[in-house]
Amino acid sequence: MTDTTPPCPRRFGRFAAGLAIMPLLAGCSHAHLSFLAPQGPIAAAQRDHFWLVIAITLVVVLPVFVLTPVIVWRYRYGGRATYRPRWSFSRRLEYVIWGIPFLIVGILAVFLWRQTYALDPYNPLPADNEPLHVQVVGYDWKWLFIYPDQHIATVDELVFPDDRPLALELTSDTVMQSFFIPSLGSQVYAMNGMVTRLHLAADGPGRFRGENSQYNGKGFHTQRFTARAVSDAAFSDFVARVRRQGRALDRPTYQILDGRNTVPELARALDGTGDDALRFSAIPDGLFSAIVAGVPIPSLLPGPVVTSARQTPLHQPQGGTP
């Protein structure tokens, strides 16, 4: 007779091994993925804030986890603990039961109030150097980064000097989206017809992953971008290279950019390749303001208007349906 009993110890061993190796796999990526491994002052402040809140709430939560199994064991059926069905009111015990949670809520309220103002994403960061101004536009399913002072733009690539803070203005040309670079801290929404702001900084050179954390259709999982903090010399080289090698942002190009497509699809539609590094030179002044105001963008750009069945009509709400 064959034994069909499942090998529970073996399965448990595999499960335990999987859990043990997960922290090691988290360290294999070169891109910093969480504010718990901060790469900037905002993320570092948020990490400290997070752990302090955890520590304060553990004052209430930890005794519950510790005492619950103790009480269950001590007063189990057949145990030897003394049964005392009659008890009297204890003022001291009531003070402890109600006073500690009340005190914790009061401490958390004051602390959270102060941190909310201290970590306001609209507050400029103190720095010796002038912040780099970047305008961010969310599309389906990609990000356009406009450098108004440098008159260039990139798709899904945010490059900035590591010794200057970032001053970001954000909007969406489609549905609401969430702009988030976890290792640099803070998350802010980008909404159609509105402008939100975000100030970030990096501690030094590095490569960080950014994303849209607001679901906006079938290409949502691909809407990630790379943020790179580089030296001043490297940033100057980057700007010069984009001005020299970047493609022109004309009407046909913008119509494809404004369509419902991922970055690889956009790249293939523009030049027939899958190159994700899309950079534009000679960006017209006022492009970001025109997008916010809902002005027909092709009227600001050179070139003919191209009609294609692959694209969604301009400035029509997009991305809501898969």
Image: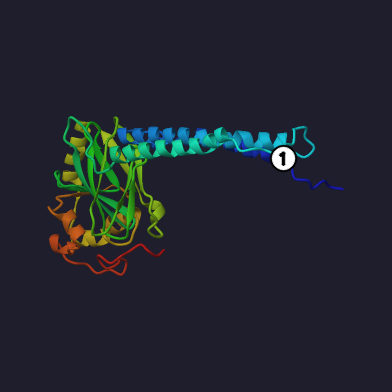
User: Is residue 202 among what the camera can see?
Assistant: yes
Q: Quadrant of residue 261?
A: bottom left
* Left or right placement of residue 93 versus residue 302 in this view: right
The x and y percentages for residue 209 are 36, 41
Q: How is the image coloured?
A: rainbow
The x and y percentages for residue 39 are 34, 33
The x and y percentages for residue 133 are 19, 43
Judge by depth and name the residue closer to the eye, 243 or 23.
Answer: 23
* Left or right placement of residue 48 versus residue 285 in this view: right
Q: Circle 1 — which element?
A: loop
User: Mark 1 packing: few (<14 Cα in 10 Å), some, or many (20+)?
Assistant: few
The x and y percentages for residue 256 are 26, 61
Q: Quadrant of residue 61?
A: top right
* Left or right placement of residue 303 versus residue 265 in this view: left
Residue corresponding to mark 1: 85
Q: Is residue 144 above or below residue 8?
A: below
User: Where is the C terminus found, in terms of image quarters?
Assistant: bottom left
Q: Quadrant of residue 18?
A: top right
Residue furthest right in the image: 1
Residue shown at the point (18%, 54%) measured from the top left? 288
Residue shown at the point (38%, 53%) measured from the top left? 214
Judge by depth and name the residue closer to the eye, 220 or 309.
Answer: 220
Q: Is residue 215 above or below residue 74?
A: below
Residue shown at the point (74%, 42%) measured from the top left? 7
Amino acid type at mark 1 = Pro
Residue shown at the point (49%, 38%) measured from the top left? 101
User: Is residue 22 among what the camera can see?
Assistant: no
The image shows a total of numbered marks equal to 1
Judge by depth and name the residue closer to the eye, 196 or 63.
Answer: 63
